[in-house]
Image (cartoon, helix red, strand yellow):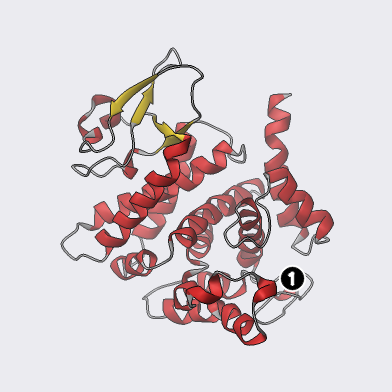
């Protein structure tokens, strides 16, 4: 590779399904810090056969300019594969894990997640294992496959941030963390029933009827997931209440902090924070993590659970302390 070296983004090996064409050039990083091309765009993926990936020690990278292409390719593949009965469940789960890897790597790039490749795999692996434990896993994967690409990635990122908040708040119970991860990942599942014409509009451009229809995605999500067996009530509460806030100015029920489900308080903060990091509708400019915290705290007046927000704020500023 020639200098200046382009920005490189680490990605999980699960993003590259065996024997499918690569959507971009793929590299690994040598101990010297140089990048070695291990797969050319258009070639069939065979990373699982490489010794380094078989030993789970590989760090695969794509150019920053190719990252979105890789994600969109994987999302399209996941949507196609999940809907086919002949595709093994473990392959579908690997695709989900790959999407989680990508969302978490984006958080690493933004210096929200601190740590190594193993740290990324720990978070994405937990999300994958949580999905795998659902008794109606095929039905759940089918629902996930029908989400718009942005919503699927957003759900994975929200799940990762929610888990980081739990860690900071010293919430270590595995069943509780599983509920948080699943609820965060599925919080926007009701969006699949909202017309694109409404989703593409900013809040200010929607009519009263369109706003009401948009806000119904919380109830629609609960109704959809009630079809699945053994979905915990806490997960349904997260989906219903992830747009509520401490001041009682959220939706759909305008309830205050004290009446919110404790796990929904965590996901509500993570969800809003992740939304501020991306500009999906043109409603606001994409913000840096520090700008997002400032916006939530100063511009909005911090309308969220205080303990949860302070945990998130501490996470965002941890990288500054680590660098000093």
Element on which disc 1 rests: helix
Left or right placement of residue 6 versus residue 74 in this view: right
At horizontal 43% and vertical 72% (from top left) the residue drawn is 231
Q: Residue at x 52, y 57 (%)?
A: 154
Q: Position of residue 57 (x, y in %)?
A: 35, 27
Q: Position of residue 181 (x, y in %)?
A: 50, 58
Say left or right for 206 vs 88.
Answer: right
Q: Is residue 57 visible?
A: no
From the viewer's perspective, is residue 179 above or below residue 16?
below
Task: Give the total number of marks visible in the rendering.
Answer: 1
Residue under circle 1? 257
Left or right of residue 295, residue 40 in this image: left
Q: Nearer the viewer, residue 199 or 94?
A: 199
- Quadrant occupied by the N terminus: top left
Q: Compare residues 16 and 285 and report the one nearer the observer.
A: 285
Which residue is farthest top?
Answer: 32
Q: Is residue 214 above or below residue 81?
A: below
Which residue: 29% across, 55% down?
77
Q: 304 and 33: which one is in front?
A: 33
Q: Can you name the residue that lies furthest to the left here? A: 86
The image quadrant that residue 145 belongs to is: bottom left
Q: Which quadrant would residue 67 be assigned to in this image?
A: top left
């Amino acid at each position: 590779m020639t200098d200046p070296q382009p920005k490189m983004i680490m990605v999980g090996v699960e993003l590259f399904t065996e024997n499918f064409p690569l959507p971009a050039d793929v590299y690994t990083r040598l101990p010297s810090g140089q990048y070695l091309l291990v797969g050319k765009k258009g070639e069939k993926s065979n990373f699982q056969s490489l010794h380094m990936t078989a030993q789970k020690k590989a760090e695969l990278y794509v150019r920053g300019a190719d990252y979105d292409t890789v994600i969109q390719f994987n999302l399209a593949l996941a949507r196609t594969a999940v809907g086919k009965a002949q595709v093994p469940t473990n392959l579908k789960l690997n695709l989900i894990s790959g999407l989680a890897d990508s969302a978490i790597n984006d958080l690493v790039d933004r210096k929200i997640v601190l740590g190594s490749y193993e740290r990324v795999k720990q978070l994405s692996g937990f999300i994958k294992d949580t999905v795998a434990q659902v008794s109606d896993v095929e039905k759940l994967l089918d629902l996930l496959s029908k989400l718009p690409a942005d919503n699927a990635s957003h759900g994975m990122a929200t799940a990762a941030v929610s888990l980081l908040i739990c860690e900071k708040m010293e919430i270590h119970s595995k069943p509780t963390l599983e509920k948080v991860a699943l609820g965060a990942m599925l919080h926007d599942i009701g969006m699949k029933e909202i017309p694109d014409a409404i989703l593409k509009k900013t809040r200010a451009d929607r009519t009263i009827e369109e706003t009401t229809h948009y806000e119904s995605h919380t109830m629609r999500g609960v109704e959809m997931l009630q079809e699945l067996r053994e979905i915990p009530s806490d997960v349904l509460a997260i989906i219903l209440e992830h747009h509520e806030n401490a001041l009682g100015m959220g939706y759909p029920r305008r309830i205050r902090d004290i009446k919110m489900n404790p796990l929904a308080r965590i996901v509500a903060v993570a969800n809003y924070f992740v939304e501020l990091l991306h500009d999906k509708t043109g409603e606001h400019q994409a913000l840096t993590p520090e700008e997002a915290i400032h916006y939530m705290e100063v511009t909005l007046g911090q309308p969220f659970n205080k303990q949860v927000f302070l945990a998130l704020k501490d996470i965002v500023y941890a990288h500054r302390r680590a660098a000093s």
